[in-house]
Amino acid sequence: MDPEALDELCAGLRSFLQAEVVGRHQSFRAGQHDLYDATGRYRPDILRSMREVRQASAAAGYFAALAPEEVGGGGLGFQALYRMWEAVFEFCGAEYWLGHQALSHWSRGPSHLYMAATPDLRAEILPDLLAGTTTTCFAMSEPDAGSDIWRMSTVARPVEGGWLLNGTKQWVTNSPYADWVLVFAVTDRALFQTKRGGLTGFVIPASSEGFRVDSVISMFGHAGGDEGILSFQEVFVPQRQVLGQPHDGLKLALSGVSMGRMYNSGRAVGMAKWALAKALAYAEDRVTFGRPLIENQAISFPLAESAMEVHAARLMGLDAARALDAGRPARALVSMSKAYSTETAVRALDRAVQVHGAMGFANETALSQAWQAMRRTCVADGSSEMMRVQIVKHLRSHGLAF
């Protein structure tokens, strides 16, 4: 997709957000601390509003634009993925958070993972996913197996007609609300111990007997959240619900890594631009000691620093996206982009809070909520430390040939 077409696409997306998201937020202006019920889950009216935004976006042609054509999406590629998520977060920031539902994230909606599903499973799941009516979650991490997947202990054993699944998953985004669960388990222990395979992917309905969301994980002092701890106790999975070939699920599980990291890169740059714009506007309007704050170098120079870093992060992300679209190995570029962009966003938000003074901590600015969300991205989809490990591996094997 050429840059001009992408510009038009993102402009249309921003118009959609203005029309469909901003008005829906009028009843949620008090902030994010009253969005949960007694169990820590989003209230029914919040979930309904999220679904309405997804469905409106699907009707407008944006929601599944990034999913592969093979599963009914637009197949627009990594540059579009980067630019569209950047546009969403630059427009919405943390203020209009319903807008974050406007695009299908690969782990929550229609994605490349369903290219490995059986035809009848696709027919059952995809229509509602594409319409934004239902959602999924991606269950990989465990209490003792995060970045080190070779410590995974969830297992599935073959039985007549399918598999029996047992284990625990943790830090599973959207799991308290998902209609379908994509879960990975050890199915060949001997092969798994060689670190060459032995994992299998399964898709189960959240209504499956033996499946349970044990708890919602709340963070940063919030009363609820989006992450959950899941348990599987003798969950029967019919053969038709296996993703791809048995014991070959590792490649499938890791196939979304670049998407997740490019999503976080675009998200971080968009959020940083949102924060920088808010800080600039406040510094121009706020008068202290007879002049606008922006005229004080102690205020203006940190904002200039943010502008330089955000621009560099954006160029880094676009370069990685172009490499992925061209089919080039881009692990180091993606790792650089993810680490630098997310860390840049945290710094930009911290500076924006400082410029606002006490107002920077007020719920109405949404800056503290944005900082919390961005601080999490320095760990999600591969921590900053893991990104540096990947970069060093590239340096040792390929030098500076990026």
Image (tube, rainbow, N blue to C red):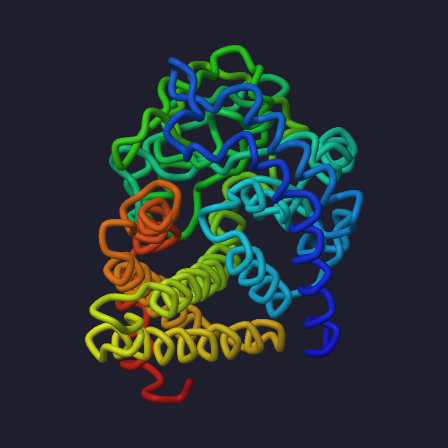
Identify the image quadrant of the C terminus: bottom left
* Image position of 14 (left or right of 210): right
> Residue 210 at x, y = what percent?
47, 12
The structure residue drawn at horizontal position 32% and vertical position 79%, both measured from the top left corner, is 304
Task: Depth check: give the residue in front, 67 or 345.
Answer: 345
Q: Residue furthest front?
A: 290
Task: Depth check: give the residue in front, 79 or 375.
Answer: 375
* Image position of 11 (left or right of 268): right
When the figure is inspected, residue 237 is found, relative to residue 123, above or below; the finding is: above
The structure residue drawn at horizontal position 32% and vertical position 81%, both measured from the top left corner, is 397
Res. 69 image quadrant: bottom right
Res. 33 image quadrant: top left
Identify the image quadrant of the N terminus: bottom right
When the figure is inspected, residue 171 is found, relative to residue 334, above or below; the finding is: above
* Image position of 251 (left or right of 384): right
> Residue 322 at x, y = what percent?
58, 77
> Residue 367 at x, y = what percent?
35, 51
The structure residue drawn at horizontal position 51% and vertical position 60%, both measured from the top left corner, is 90
Q: Is residue 6 visible?
A: yes
> Residue 303 at x, y = what percent?
31, 73
The structure residue drawn at horizontal position 45% and vertical position 41%, both measured from the top left corner, is 199
Q: Is residue 393 visible?
A: no
